[in-house]
Amino acid sequence: MRVLDALNSPRPSVSFEFFPPKDQAAAERLAERVARLAHLNPDFVSVTYGAGGGGTDAERQLASLRATEQLAGTAPAARVAHLTLTGHSQARLVELVERFLESKVEGFMALRGDPPGGPKGDWQPEPGGLRFATELVELIASLTDVPIGVAAFPYAHPTARSKAHDAEVLAMKQAAGAQFAITQVCFDAEAYSALLDRAQAAGATLPIIPGVMPVTGASSVAKLEAFSGAPLPTALAEQIESAASPEAISQVGIEWSVGLVRDLLAAGAPGVHFYTLNTSLATEAICHRLGLGGGAGGGIGG
């Protein structure tokens, strides 16, 4: 239960998320970047499902599974597996859970997944599949006692009726067996604090880890907005626009993230989850500036 131990520790937890490499060259680059983050000793690492990438839903899930398995030899930190409903029957989901458990993962992220065309598209369950992330939480909980995480939304899910209803769904996920949550990309501590208030009002008491994605270049701005479901804060957008070089944009992103993480921790966040985009320099710089890292997991790469 290292994931839950980290979230209950007085020291802020640190976790990193990667996405599955598309080919051997990308796999080698990812291995180098994972190794570069070794000394930060994250509490857990995860490999996303890779939604929006090439291939079918089943192929992307398999790539995530394989990448998660490959971390077993180089990641003494706890590994958290991503699992989605898209492209899978219930029987196939059971197979995937069992395969992940065989590779000794220490947690799951139970996600519905995006429909074709993006988060706002019309989502339909697979034949013989499940409909909601809540049902996936129940399924995983029936097969194992490893901690289960779910998604939370500072700016509300794109298809939610309201932010309050979003919080009610989070409470339902907890009732189904979820033990922690990770937010979509969060731009400001006020949005995170408001999410905590809504969650508490709805009866959701599970730890909620804010997700942070540093700006690393002009191309990452669109990814930030897509991941968060909200536009960049005006002040951040203006700083990026006025930056004179790629290096200056990266520095803007690091400085903004340093201030953001400080504010998030002051607002009561149990830790921070970095969406690394399979790079390491910005995440490493932010953690160094804030003195983050040194978790019980022992680090990536030993």
Image (cartoon, helix red, strand yellow):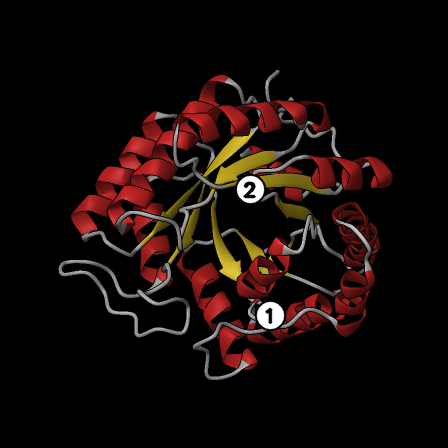
Q: Tell me the quarter of the image containing the C terminus.
A: top right
Q: Residue at x 37, y 25 (%)?
A: 103
Quadrant for residue 60, please give it: top left
The vertical placement of 93 against 256, above or below, is: above
Residue found at the far front of this picture: 244
Residue nearer the viewer, 122 or 217: 217
Residue designated by label 1: 199
Residue designated by label 2: 17
Residue 178 falls left or right of residue 57: right
Residue 72 falls left or right of residue 202: left
Residue found at the far bottom of this picture: 161
Residue 61 visible: yes
Residue 53 falls left or right of residue 287: left
Numbered badge on residue 148: none
**Total residue callouts:** 2
The vertical placement of 92 against 297, above or below, is: below
Residue 182 x, y percent position in the rendering = 57, 54
Residue nearer the viewer, 77 or 238: 238
Residue 197 x, y percent position in the rendering = 68, 73
Under circle 1, the secondary element is helix
Q: Earlier in the sequence, mark 1 or mark 2?
A: 2
Q: Amino acid at mark 1?
A: Ala
Mark 2, other Cα within 10 Å: few <14 / some 14–19 / many ≥20:
some
Q: Residue at x 45, y 45 (%)?
A: 48
Q: Residue at x 68, y 51 (%)?
A: 217
Under circle 2, the secondary element is strand
Q: Residue at x 76, y 70 (%)?
A: 190
Residue 200 falls left or right of residue 128: right
